[in-house]
Amino acid sequence: MAKRALITGVTGQDGSYLAELLLDQGYEVVGMVRRSSTVNFERIAHIQDRLTLVAGDLLDEVSLIAVLRDHPPSEVYNLAAQSFVQTSWSQPVLTGETTALGVTRLLDAIRTVDPEIRYYQASSSEMFGKVLEVPQRETTPFYPRSPYGVAKVYGHWITVNYRESYGLHASSGMLFNHESPRRGLEFVTRKVTHGAARIALGLDDELRLGNLDAQRDWGYAADYVRAMWLMLQQDTPDDYVVATGETHSVRELCQLAFDAVGLDWEKHVVVDERFLRPAEVDLLVGDPTKARQTLGWCREVDFPGLVTTMVEADTAMIRGQLR
Ligand code: NAP
Ligand code: GDD
């Protein structure tokens, strides 16, 4: 019998890559989607006929219990969240309801319906925030710097708590930034690769950004969803940092992306204070030793390769729209 997995956030960047991976492994994949007045299945359109899509919302525990009862999974991947850091200052309560309390709702639904279900929590390097150690590892204390980071710390600890209180096979992946051509346009990598492509095609002349000095440990999303799956295949649940071990600035990102289209980034990028944050995470760089040694995980795509791929994908997409 095929294993059945439930993915919350299946319409998101990571949800789409994880769904592909699990389908390739022979899983039956159930994707939870929330009600919307317009369909937003762009990232899963190519695999939609192989997925079972069911309605549910992290804000509504009744819907979570119904999904688990109607489509009993052996693994649940909780990827759903209000995931954009900047928005978490303008919508802090919604961010807390979804990204923090949503985790409790789902864990409690699992405990009620079937405590044998294995659970993955999408935790984040944003929990390290104003970092207390470089590089950041599983034992580094948290110091979140945004309502989103605070909510993720709650989600992480409630996962650990349900594991310790009820013996759930619940693991938390502390994933550093991971990107792809499917990344939302509001995140800085995609904003830069899409912006560079538009400027190269003569559609825009400038790209307005915030803090160019911020440094991130950027990897490729398809590499990172493999780590999620590996965590749930272990005999014992645990917490893991997933990262490349390298850090790069937004400035370097701009240089690589504009180089890829043969332009000088300094002639087009304009700093705009609207994109500065009330509190910033200046530097993230993770130590993935535990994931490498225990899970056998390693990344396959490096930072220049990632940026070039994203610029090429954006250029091709925009050209297609112009035709
Ligand atoms: P994303 O593209 O923003 O996707 C978020 C998903 O959550 C979407 O499918 C969204 O549905 C869904 N969602 C939002 N609110 C919901 C609700 N109330 N009920 C049910 N579904 C809801 O995020 P991502 O980049 O794939 O990230 C996946 C997860 O990993 C998130 O939890 C994120 O916080 C975490 N994470 C991401 C990174 C990264 O670098 N990408 C790093 C560390 C952790 P709609 O399509 O309907 O909006
Ligand atoms: N979005 C954005 N837009 N960020 C900018 C801009 C801009 O115009 N200019 C500079 N930045 C800087 C931000 O201030 C931040 O320091 C950095 O670029 C990265 O911003 P994002 O791409 O928005 O990602 P993030 O690091 O805040 O959050 C992402 O990674 C987290 C893991 O560390 C999200 O995917 C989170 O959901 C995830 O948990």
Image (cartoon, helix red, strand yellow):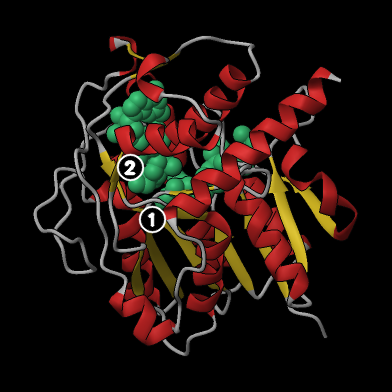
Depth order, front residue of 103/175: 175
If the image is split into quadrants, where does the N terminus sit?
Answer: bottom right
Q: Is residue 17 left or right of residue 23?
A: left
Is 179 rendered above or below residue 40?
Answer: below
Q: Which mark is residue 123?
A: 1
Residue 313: percent from the left, percent from the top? 67, 40
**Image location of residue 72, percent across then percent down:** 72, 69
Could you say which is closer to the camera, residue 310 or residue 16?
Answer: 310
Q: What residue is shown at x 38% (from left), y 55% (from top)? A: 123
Camera-side mark, 1 or 2: 1
Closest to the observer: 294 or 306?
306
Point out the tag, 1 or 2, that comes first from the N-terminus. Answer: 1
Q: Residue at x 29, y 77 (%)?
A: 289
Query: Which one is in front, 14 or 218?
Result: 218
Residue at position x 14%, y 49% in the image: 131
Q: Position of residue 150 (x, y in %)?
A: 27, 41
